């Protein structure tokens, strides 16, 4: 099963992708996590990606597409995956479709987690991230057991640089300009599924499960 998560930054794509990955035993593939791991490890890719990420801009397609295609070519992805944060542009979606068509495969579902912009700034301001294991929390809606500490690995949690309010506004603009057109792209292919992302995260997950079966 190959699933794409669509939605604005902070809509809950990552939260839901992790739950899907666990229930359906497929890997959770997040391009944002891959970039952050590269930044943490000081790689050349990380240095290049950081320039864009800190400004709330998209990392250029040339850099992004290759890391994604390399990742989904790995053994653990052979029975499917849930993509979180990719594709974010029409050209990215076209490259993925082309690569899958060559393998005789296709995306099964594109799930749009719908959350209006008004809710997003609050979500992002309260998000706390573990840069070691990729776990995500919210200070109110999904608090860690000990404030500021990752439940999974014990690392100190941070407010991501790109979750600061000025950058969030920029990311929302970029989302509407470059990523939202993917909703129509996948609708035309007949695989778009919409869920209300404003409700409790367990209710969002229940709606997704009723789609995936
Ligand atoms: P995305 O991956 O789309 O950027 P996240 O999954 O990281 O978004 O969620 C953004 C923030 O909102 C996180 O702090 C997360 O804990 C919180 N969150 C996710 N889903 C919900 C929800 N349904 N209700 C309230 N808060 C949520
Ligand atoms: P995310 O963790 O999905 O919120 O992504 C954080 C940031 O990484 C984004 O704001 C972009 O700068 C960059 N990024 C992640 N995925 C992509 C992608 N598919 N295309 C371009 N940039 C991306």
Image (cartoon, rainbow, N blue to C red):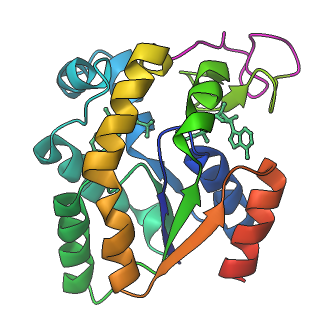
Determine whether 137 is above or below 176 in the image. above
Residue at figure coordinates x 58%, y 45% from the top left: 11
Residue 27 vertical placement versus 41 (above, below): below
* Residue stretch rendered in magenta on the structure: 145-160
One can see residue 35 in this view: no
Q: Tell me where residue 99 sits by quadrant.
A: bottom left
User: What main secondary structure does the magenta stretch of the protein show?
Assistant: loop
Q: Residue at image x 24%, y 55%?
A: 89
The answer to whether residue 200 is above or below residue 145 is below
Q: Residue at x 79, y 25 (%)?
A: 151
Give the image quarter of residue 35.
Answer: top left
Q: Residue at x 38, y 19 (%)?
A: 167
Please state if 99 lies on the left or on the right of 138 as rendered: left
| Residue 146 falls within the magenta-colored stretch | yes
The quadrant in which the C terminus is found is: bottom right
Q: Is residue 48 visible?
A: yes
Judged from this view, the residue extending furthest toward the front is 118
Figure label count: 0
Q: Residue furthest left?
A: 62
Q: In this view, does 96 lie to the left or right of 175?
A: left
Q: Quadrant of ligand 2?
A: top left
Residue 179 in picture, x, y percent from top left: 32, 53
Q: x, y percentage for residue 96?
A: 25, 68
Residue 156 in the figure: left or right of residue 93: right
Q: Which percent across, then down, holds residue 146?
A: 86, 13
Q: Does the magenta stretch include residue 207?
A: no
Q: In which quarter of the image is residue 190?
A: bottom left
- How far across and how far down the image is residue 103, in percent? 25, 84
């Amino acid at each position: 099963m190959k699933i794409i998560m669509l939605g604005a930054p902070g809509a809950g794509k990552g939260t839901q992708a992790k739950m899907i990955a666990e229930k359906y035993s497929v890997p959770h593939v997040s391009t944002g996590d891959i970039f952050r791991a590269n930044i943490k490890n000081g790689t050349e890719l990380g240095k290049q990606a950081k320039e864009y990420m800190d400004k709330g801009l998209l990392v250029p397609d040339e850099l992004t597409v290759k890391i994604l295609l390399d990742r989904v070519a790995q053994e653990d992805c052979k029975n499917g995956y849930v993509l979180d944060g990719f594709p974010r542009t029409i050209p990215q979606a076209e490259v993925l479709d082309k690569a899958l068509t060559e393998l005789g495969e296709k995306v099964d579902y594109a799930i749009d987690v719908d959350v209006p912009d008004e809710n997003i700034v609050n979500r992002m301001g309260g998000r706390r991230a573990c840069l070691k294991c990729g776990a995500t929390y919210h200070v109110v809606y999904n608090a860690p057991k000990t404030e500021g500490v990752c439940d999974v690995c014990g690392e100190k949690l941070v407010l991501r640089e790109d979750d600061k309010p000025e950058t969030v506004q920029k990311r929302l603009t970029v989302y509407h300009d470059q990523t939202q057109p993917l909703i129509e792209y996948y609708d035309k292919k007949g695989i778009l599924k919409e869920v209300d992302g404003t409700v409790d995260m367990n209710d969002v997950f229940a709606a997704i499960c009723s789609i995936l079966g």
